[in-house]
């Protein structure tokens, strides 16, 4: 097995974890404003110190690769690359929407065999970053930014129970009233849930190029106009 440092900064949560032999042995998180820029480096340093003090050598760094917050993803990937370069480690990229599915699959909720999972990340206005997954995390369509309407996901809801979750799912509660539409509150991406996905990638040797890897932003960053100060 392996020892992997996990970093997630894809949404408002900033989190770091360490797993060894498939089990999480360290984790930390912050939901403070601007935590990605002000606290991530300190959280990573603490995680590295923890493993160094226990004489546990790292094998890889996994990072949530998006979609999600443009700034958050950029900071997380840059930090992950820095650790990889500094310690000569492999880089593993974890799609954020798959990461969101992990706490649902590991939770106490009993899902039928034909259940579909629909993680959603808020993309502002009525858009969400989303995809549809089977219980084995097979994507059924390309990840996209969707505008939520009453007809959204009708082709899946007509024949499957579909579970919606993530910080973008609240946009759908007023529209998706089909009996097969189910909503799960409180599901957030977190570095500690990256462990099973990263372990699988590590065993398969599915590593990203540290030099050239870029986050999956999905949409181009559009900077807002600075506010004009009145004199």
Image (tube, rainbow, N blue to C red):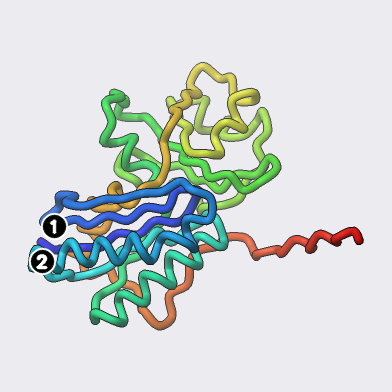
Q: Is residue 22 left or right of residue 44?
A: left
Tag 2 residue: 56
Residue under the image location 32 percent in, 64 percent down:
44
Q: Is residue 2 left or right of residue 165?
A: left
Q: Nearer the viewer, mark 1 or mark 2?
A: 2
Q: Relative to 134, is 9 above or below?
A: below
Q: Nearer the viewer, residue 16 or 207?
A: 16
x and y percentages locating residue 6 in the rendered image: 30, 59
Tag 1 residue: 20
Give residue 128's quadrant in the image.
top right
Q: Circles 1 and 2: CB distance less than 8 Å?
A: yes
Q: Relative to 56, is 148 above or below?
A: above
Q: Nearer the viewer, residue 7 or 153?
A: 7
Q: CA distance from mark 1 to mark 2?
A: 9 Å
Residue under the image location 49 percent in, 45 percent down:
131
What is the number of the mark on residue 167?
none
Tell me which numbered mark, 1 or 2, is placed earlier along the sequence. Answer: 1
Helix, strand or loop at label 1? It is: strand
Residue under the image location 68 percent in, 33 percent down:
149
Quarter of the picture containing the C terminus is bottom right
Residue count near mark 1 (Cα–Cα under 10 Å), binned few <14, some 14–19, many ≥20: many
Q: Is residue 120 left or right of residue 22?
A: right
Residue count near mark 2 (Cα–Cα under 10 Å), binned few <14, some 14–19, many ≥20: few
x and y percentages locating residue 103 in the rendered image: 32, 38
Furthest residue in direction top, as rendered: 179
Give residue 76's quadrant in the image.
bottom left
Residue under the image location 48 percent in, 38 percent down:
166
x and y percentages locating residue 177 in the rendered image: 59, 19
Q: Nearer the viewer, residue 6 or 142?
A: 6
Helix, strand or loop at label 2? It is: loop
């Amino acid at each position: 097995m392996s020892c992997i440092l996990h970093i997630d900064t894809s949404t408002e949560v900033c989190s770091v974890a360490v797993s060894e032999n498939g089990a999480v042995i360290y984790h930390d998180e912050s939901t403070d404003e601007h935590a990605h820029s002000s606290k991530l480096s300190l959280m990573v340093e603490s995680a590295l110190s923890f493993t160094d003090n226990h004489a546990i050598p790292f094998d890889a760094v996994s990072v949530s690769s998006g979609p999600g917050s443009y700034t958050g993803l950029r900071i997380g990937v840059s930090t992950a690359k820095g650790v990889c370069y500094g310690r000569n480690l492999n880089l593993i990229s974890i799609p954020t929407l798959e990461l969101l599915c992990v706490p649902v699959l590991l939770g106490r909720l009993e899902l039928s065999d034909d259940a579909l999972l629909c993680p959603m990340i808020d993309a502002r206005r009525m858009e969400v970053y989303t995809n549809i997954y089977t219980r084995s995390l097979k994507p059924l369509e390309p990840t996209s930014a969707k505008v939520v309407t009453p007809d959204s996901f009708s082709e899946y809801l007509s024949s499957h129970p579909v579970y919606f979750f993530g910080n973008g799912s609240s946009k759908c509660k007023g529209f998706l009233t089909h009996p097969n539409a189910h909503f799960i509150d409180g599901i957030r991406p977190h570095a500690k849930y990256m462990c099973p996905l990263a372990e699988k990638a590590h065993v398969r040797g599915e590593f990203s190029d540290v030099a050239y890897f870029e986050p999956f932003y999905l949409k181009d960053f559009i900077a807002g106009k600075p506010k004009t100060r009145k004199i």
